[in-house]
Amino acid sequence: MRISFLINNIYGIGGTNRTVINLAEALSVHHEVEIVSVFRRAAAPKFGISPRVGVRALVDLRPGSADRTAAGSGEPSEVVPRQEEFYAQYSRFTDDRIIRELQKTTADVVVGTRPSLNLFVAGHTRDGALRVAQEHMTHLAIPPAVRAEMARVYPRLDAVTTVTEADARSFTENTPVPGVPVTGIPNSVPRPSVEPSDCSRKVVVSAGRMHHIKRYDLLVRAFGTLAAEFPDWQLRIYGDGGEAGKLRALISELGLAGRALLMGGFSPIESEWAKGSIAAVTSSAESFGMTLVEAMRCGLPVVSTDCPVGPREILRDGEDGFLVPNGDVAGIAHGLRRLMADEPLRRAMGAAALRNATRYDPAAVADRYVELFEDAARRRAATERGYRAPAATRRTGARHLTVPPVSLGAATVDVTADDAGWLRFSADGPGEGRRRWQFVLRHKPADGAPRPDLPLRTSRKDLENGGTRYTAVLTPSALDELGDGRWQVTMSAAKSSPVHMKAGVRDTRALIDARARTVGRPPTGPIGWNLPYAQPNGRLMLRTVLREEHAECTRVEAADGAITLRGVLTGGRRIEPGALFVVSRRGRHTRTFSVPVEVLGRQAFRAEAPLRHVVDHRLERWEDWDWWLQPDPFDRRKVRICHLLEDFADVKAAYVHPSVPLVGDEPSPYAVVHPARPVWVRPYCSASGAMAMNVVDR
């Protein structure tokens, strides 16, 4: 059976993209499958796609493409209703491209994936192909004018699917299409490649686009009511979008900086779910609830708002999570508290979530779609003379859900870290042939000469699907050669150019435990840290830390006109009585101020930044002051205070501290201008991990 999915933009990130890819890959085990993207705005899809699934685009919108200024591109679409969410993206030019594709397709089944595309599929697909509409949106969230057009055009379809049974009923009641069955088939979520969570780490995780419908503000407020009761818990929210700025302001307002972290987008996300012990979903509406299933497949119990559709069909309240009233901060907090306070309950519910989520395996969902296609073909054959039903299965053999990538450049590397500094690399590549590929770390110096490449002893294993699995181990002793810096993770072979590998799953949950141990009992020798991370372009990098002495910032409080920091010192020296916290102005006109630190037991310290001094002695409207620790008042050697030892790379973006306003008591002879309005002082972590504060006259 030839199956073609028509999607808006497979090159971006979104829940529809992810679930269509999951289904396409599962169907491709026994069928010929392609994904046809209307638009192409990037060189390659953000999500990895098996080479077994064909991918192509109809309209290329990358810079320099002739399609960007083609005739008709400035004229409105004649198919997509104005009220449809993506109406502005379509034009008479895109109409022509889509219609031409549907009229000449050789697919046996064409599946549209949103209302605008389903209108094309229903109205313009060639007669010999089955026409199926997937509805990923909650039905009543579709504008009435669009639903009216659906009611007019959809009778030419062979089947409609929704992602929940409740939405199938809503579709039938509100937009009846006589003779066309509407079936609820859930989205699929593959079994994660990471080990499930053991529900021991005190982290609440939430993930999804930063959109007001996700109501992360409710989650932050609910967590805020529990922060004092559970001071060692952390909230992590993953996702990109326009609501991030408002959420940061709310986090600052509630005094949750450093406790509630906005982690940005992250892919693949399963390693981050597995770091948590509780998943939280606080949306006001969900068409399905992909994040719920993703979290459950990683062994997390879920606290979810009881949306009109979606979560109540996924969660079994009281068994694998809690359904709480929609829009209710107190209800969300109650559900979180029950799990935060009871580790045995978390573990039991996490195990139930792991069991119950297997019904969303892609193979199971794909079987339901094949049944739907075959049933549609039987109905078409019974009513349409001359229709020839497609062959049910064209591929035979074992149901291998993986195939080797076409090249090493298309492969991804999975990395697992343990709490002792070991890293384990694994990549599935194409059949090796004559070349002997191996992992090689290549230094990327910030300045100065690069260090020599570090080859890793690489093992190879032939796979049943014809590929090769490469594995390697990086030991803590390798830090003696790697030192302090950043390294590309590459594959190299004789007479071949090095390939900078793509990042796959980075399972760094053990580093949470390693940080807690380091902060609790700072080592008296050198400190080492290995952290794999992905660049914005998806390439895999390694951040290595090796320092004889290191001052790690463990907490910053910015409130009531003061900035207070806490930290620990590792290495051979002790924090002596009279130790100093030193701030130094960056740039040509250096200046330093120091204040005594309070020693807090074993190598821990606390200090209050000398804000009055830096404000009254500033020379520019914007200045940066670096933070240092001088452990011995009689030894002028200082240690840079950093925030480095985390399980993720972008500490700067995750730990966003609020600004503190100060007003000068009297005119300063040093400042260019000393206005009556506040001067703002904000602590921050630089991209390199060093702590500092900026002083800004706004």
Image (spheres, rainbow, N blue to C red):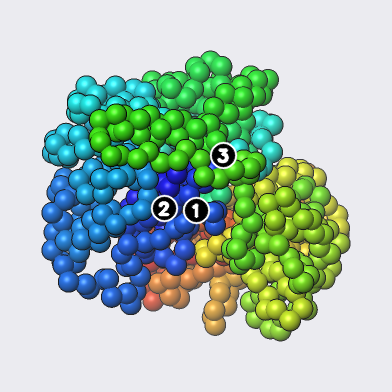
Q: Is residue 525 visible?
A: yes
Amino acid on which disc 2 is placed = Ile
**Residue drawn 62% across the image and 52% down it:** 403
Say if 116 sits above or below 281 in the image.
below
* Residue 452 percent coordinates (x, y): 78, 78
Q: Which of 461 and 48 is in front in this view?
A: 461
Amino acid on which disc 3 is placed = Pro
For marks 3 and 2, give the one nearer the viewer.
2
Q: Is residue 278 visible?
A: no
Answer whether labels 3 and 1 touch (C-beta < 8 Å): no
Image quadrant containing the C terminus = bottom left
* Residue 88 percent coordinates (x, y): 20, 56
The residue that label 3 is drawn on is 190
Answer whether labels 3 and 2 touch (C-beta < 8 Å): no
**Residue drawn 72% across the image and 50% down it:** 464
The residue that label 1 is drawn on is 53
Q: Distance between the residues labelled 3 and 2?
A: 18 Å
Residue 305, picture quadrant? top left
Amino acid on which disc 1 is placed = Val
Among numbered discs 1 and 2, the one appearing first in the sequence: 2
Answer whether labels 1 and 2 touch (C-beta < 8 Å): yes
Q: How far apart are marks 3 and 1 (CA)?
A: 16 Å
On residue 35, the disc is: 2
* Residue 514 percent coordinates (x, y): 75, 46
Say if 283 sits above or below 118 in the image.
above
Instruction: Say how many tags the image has.
Output: 3
Q: What element carries label 3?
A: loop
Q: How crowded is mark 3: few (under 14 residues within 10 Å), some or many (20 or more)?
A: some
Residue 372, picture quadrant? top left
Q: Nearer the viewer, residue 550 or 490?
A: 490
Q: Residues within 10 Å of mark 2 (few under 14, many from 20)?
A: many
